[in-house]
Every structure is written in C-alpha cells, then in structure tokens.
C-alpha cells in the first residue's frame, strides 16, 4: 500500500494539483492534464495579445519553463501513464478512503483568486512574491498565475511559511524597547527642562521664606530693603511667568506623547510634582500684596524725611 501511495504522489498535475487526467507528456518530460495544458496555451496566447499562431506556438512548461513548440492538440495522451493511473486509483480506492476524505476536507479550505474571483482549493493556490508583500499576500489560481505572472517569482502557497514569517515578525516586535524609539535628543532636552523648572521653584521658595521673615518684623524695614523687595518681586513675577509657560508647554508635549504609556506616565508624575510647586508659590500672593503695601508705606516716610 505504501508503494502505491508513493506512486500516486508522483501522478499529480503541477497546475491543478490533482491526479493527472488524460495526461500529456511534454518535450521536457513533465506531464500535465490535457485540459490544463490547453488552458495554459490559451492563457499564454491571450497574455501575448494573440501573437501566438497555430504555426508558431510560444508557451513554456510551468515547471521548468522550457519552451513548448507543439500545440496542445498535437501532443498525444500518454496511454501507458493513463492506464497506470487508472489501475492505481482502482487498487487504492478502498485503502485510501480515509486519506481521500482528509484530502477532500483540506481542499475544502478554499481561497479566492484575486484576478478571476474564482474559488481555488489550497492545493491549487499560488502566490507571487514579485508583485505582493509577504505579509499581505494575494492568492491566484494556476491559470491566472501562469497567465499574468509567468516571468515572476510565482510559487505554490505554503501556509506554514506564511505563519512562520508572521511569528518571526511578532517576535521582533516584542523585542523592541519603546524607549529606544524615542529620540535621545528629545529625552535629554525634556529631562533638562524638568530639572531647570524644579530648581527654579526651589529658588522661589527660598526667597519667599526670606520675605516671610522680613514681613513679620516691619519695624526693621528700611528704604533700601523696600527697594530690594520691589526688585525681588519683579524678578519673582518674571520667573513665575516663565515657569508657568514652560509648564504649559510641557503639558502639551505630554499630551502629544500619549502613544507611549510608559513615558507618558513618567512625565505625568513629574508634571504633577511641578504643578504642586506652582500652587505653593501662587498661594503666596498675599505675601506679594503685603510686600507692595510695605513699599508704599516706606515711600511716604522717605518723602517726609527729605522735606
């Protein structure tokens, strides 16, 4: 039985991928079904704009691409091979019944030819590596394949190869570090801006604490101290405006970087810390107002002394 099964494997037409039916052997030694050979000739003739004539046939073997110079009707059926196929089919019909069912089930897994829109079973499905992407494949039936892709890298579709390619691509994607895709210059620039903002707010807190200690003892305020306070308040106001603008810019940048969850979360944490520092400084507006009042009080005293 194993011998007959191996013989049957060799009696397959390379176009329809089924058992040879009225086999015709070409000059190169390869054999096709009679109907498949005729379809191959018709497709080649149409693809060459009917330049093929009955006197000068010009089509090639789909297996080895050797040119065929005989018309399909001029090639006789290989009677010896036909009888061998008939005998093997009769002898193995009962023993191969289960295998035939499995084969039929597999063939029922049909694909659609993108050219003629006809269904073609898995055994007769081809792909063109020249025209199509290996991850977005298109299926072709044997007739359309040899008609439109005869000079291309045109092969039978192998599901295992396709699956292995996809698995390999997924493994590569899993190995990608999201942080490595972020431009190093952008990362350094953002980290530097965050550090500068944090230092600026810490500096403001120190100045505010000094103002608190000064304002708690107004009797020791002189004209020079009042002038210094005024200048310091202006510096604080300018610095706060600058930092608020940077914070707003940083917020917009974080929104744009929302695609990367890990980076986005890290920046949000830093942004929240900065916002808290911002609230602390803005909560000392009463100090700024009180300092302005002190300056106004000192100014009239200076005028009276001058008088």
Image: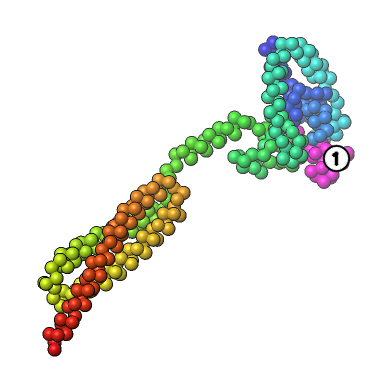
Residue 79 visible within the image: yes
- Image point 86% across, 26% down: which residue? 76
**Left or right: 87 in relation to 129:** right
**Left or right: 141 in relation to 46:** left
Q: Quadrant of residue 19?
A: top right
Asked if residue 203 is among those painted magenta in the image, a careful observer would answer no
Rendered position, 122 above or below 189? above
Q: Quadrant of residue 290?
A: bottom left
Rendered position, 226 above or below 275? below
Q: Quadrant of residue 250?
A: bottom left
Q: Dot 1: few (<14), some (14–19), or many (≥20) neighbours within 10 Å?
A: few
Percent of width and height locating residue 154:
68, 37
Of 91 and 150, which appears nearest the observer?
A: 91
**Left or right: 143 in relation to 73:** left
Percent of width and height locating residue 57:
84, 38
On the rendered image, what quadrant is the C terminus found in? bottom left
- Image point 81% across, 19% down: which residue? 82
Dominant secondary-structure state across the stretch colored magenta: loop
Of 257 and 288, which appears nearest the observer?
A: 288
Q: Residue furthest bottom?
A: 307
- Image point 88% across, 39% down: which residue? 54
Location of mark 1 (residue): 56
**Which residues lie in the magenta part?**
41-64
Rendered position, 222 above or below 98? below
Asked if residue 47 is among those painted magenta in the image, a careful observer would answer yes
Percent of width and height locating residue 192:
32, 57
């Amino acid at each position: 039985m194993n011998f007959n099964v191996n013989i049957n494997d060799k009696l397959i037409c390379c176009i329809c991928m089924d058992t040879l039916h009225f086999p015709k052997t070409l000059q190169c030694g390869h054999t096709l079904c009679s109907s498949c050979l005729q379809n191959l000739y018709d497709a080649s003739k149409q693809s060459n704009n009917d330049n093929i004539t009955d006197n000068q046939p010009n089509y090639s073997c789909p297996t080895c691409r050797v040119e065929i110079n005989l018309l399909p009707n001029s090639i006789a059926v290989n009677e010896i091979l036909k009888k061998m196929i008939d005998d093997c089919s009769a002898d193995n019909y009962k023993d191969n019944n289960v295998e035939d069912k499995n084969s039929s089930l597999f063939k029922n897994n049909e694909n659609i030819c993108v050219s003629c829109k006809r269904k073609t079973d898995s055994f007769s499905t081809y792909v063109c590596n020249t025209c199509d992407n290996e991850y977005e494949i298109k299926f072709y039936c044997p007739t359309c394949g040899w008609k439109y892709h005869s000079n291309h890298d045109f092969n039978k579709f192998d599901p295992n190869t396709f699956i292995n390619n996809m698995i390999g691509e997924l493994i590569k994607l899993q190995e990608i570090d999201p942080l490595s895709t972020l431009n190093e210059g952008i990362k350094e620039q953002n980290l530097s801006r965050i550090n500068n903002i944090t230092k600026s707010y810490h500096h403001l807190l120190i100045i505010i604490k000094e103002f608190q200690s000064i304002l708690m003892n107004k009797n020791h305020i002189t004209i020079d101290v009042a002038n210094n306070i005024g200048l310091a308040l202006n510096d604080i106001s300018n610095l706060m405006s600058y930092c608020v603008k940077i914070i707003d810019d940083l917020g917009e940048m974080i929104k744009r970087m929302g695609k990367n969850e890990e980076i986005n979360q890290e920046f949000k944490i830093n942004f929240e810390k900065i916002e808290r520092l911002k609230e602390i400084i803005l909560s000392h507006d009463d100090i700024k107002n009180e300092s302005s009042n002190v300056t106004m009080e000192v100014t009239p005293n200076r005028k009276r002394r001058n008088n």
